[in-house]
Image: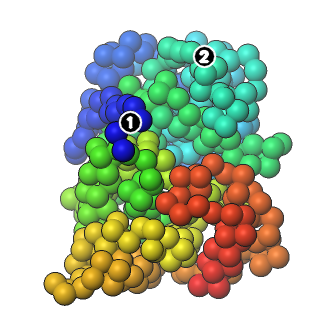
Amino acid sequence: MFDEITTFSFPTRIVFGRAAVRRLPACLEETGVRKPLLVTDPGLRASPAFDAVASVLTEAGTSYAVFDGVHGNPIEEDVLEAVEMYRSAGCDGVIGLGGGSAIDVAKAVVVMARHAGALADLEAQAGGMDRMTGPYDPIIAIPTTAGTGSEVGRSSVITSHKLGRKIIVFSPWLMPKRAILDPELTVSLPPFLTAATGMDAFTHCLESLTCPVFHPLCDAIAIHGLELAIRYLERATRDGKDIEARGNMQVAAAMGAIAFQKDLGATHSLAHPLSTAFGVHHGLANALCLPAVMRFNLVAAAPHYARLARLFDATGSDATESEAAARSIGEVENMIDRLGITRGLRNHGIPRESLESLSISAFDDSCHKTNIRPCTRGDLLKLYEESWNA
């Protein structure tokens, strides 16, 4: 068990709390950034969260440029356009403001600003990590959702329409130098997006916990992240102004991203093609596919799912491990229902005839390779079919 050498690392400095965004100028100074490119999306550009960040920068006398063209599922063109602005404006660092999409684009910008080739050259599956030698300009991440945890992660996921799939760029160089978690910046997030992004955080924690890679630190973090999501996600969805719930969900999201440096599982392999082919929100895609994957993994993941059931307080003192594990699936489905998420891919514009091609893309995705139970392409097709009929 201990013959294989494993490395542990948790280096991102996190600034957390109400009005934490006021620390942005200090973070820029600490990291040596004089003129940042603020990367965000059109909707957030018109939001109070953007106004709060812009106000802090203006009051500090900080010169900055803004790229606000990030798509909901970020595409390669977003990165290339932002890189052009980064260079022309003479920027020396980025601020990723928004959900995982904006932060992932911000990460890719600092790398592509120095890379002469294509983004696909840097894809993890193609050995891209070895091509990123760094150091790159500093990244500061300010999430306005509680889901992806990209603010503490070392990956960037960008859709390439040319390739017809998502490109995953992965390197320690992509970890932000600072992550500013200010729950006040998340209060305007609508209930549906609160629920969907929260289920992304929940899925990160659960899939990293069950991932068969030895990393006890990540396991402990994943367990507490699950506990926080179970306790606070429904509260945050019901009342967006519940700062305690909002803040704890930000922590849960960060924990999920820290934990999945172990890696993820089949749910994410199913979710990624749904976003690429049909634009399904990533967190929603995870929520729609997770119960089927849990049933598929039930025997292999029984100890982990039994622990999850106890976090839901869904076991009696006389329940066996297998009984508790089985109950956890119903608890997850009930939570999804209470969040107002309609289950069933058929209810979200996914044609049944697309499942075959989706399963091919899902099998090409690397996440299922660390699923606790090995998956064939046929298994992934069956999981899509079960998720479609749910």
**The N terminus lies in quadrant:** top left
Q: Disc 1 on helix, strand or loop?
A: loop
Indicate which disc, 2 or 1, sits on the residue closer to the N terminus: 1
**72, 272: nearer the viewer:** 272
Residue found 47% across the figure and 27% down from its top? 172
Q: Is residue 51 above or below residue 13?
A: below
Residue found 59% across the figure and 26% down from its top? 129
Q: Is residue 121 left or right of residue 205?
A: right
Tell me the mark number nearer the camera, choosing from 2 and 1: 1
Residue at the disc numbered 1: 3
Q: Is residue 166 above or below residue 79?
A: below
Q: Is residue 142 left or right of residue 162?
A: left
The x and y percentages for residue 295 are 50, 77
Residue found 38% across the figure and 36% down from its top? 3
Residue 335 shows in this picture: no
Residue found 31% across the figure and 16% down from its top? 30
**The C terminus lies in quadrant:** bottom right
Q: Disc 2 versus disc 1: distance between alpha carbons?
A: 50 Å
Callout 1: few (<14), some (14-19), or many (20+) C-alpha neighbours within 10 Å?
Answer: few
The x and y percentages for residue 257 are 41, 46
Amino acid of disc 1: Asp
The x and y percentages for residue 116 are 73, 16
The answer to which quarter of the image holds residue 141 is top left
The x and y percentages for residue 366 are 63, 48
Residue 346 shows in this picture: yes
Q: Is residue 321 above or below residue 221?
A: below
Residue at the disc numbered 2: 89
Q: Is residue 288 left or right of residue 360?
A: left
Amino acid of disc 2: Ala
Q: Is residue 2 left or right of residue 103?
A: left
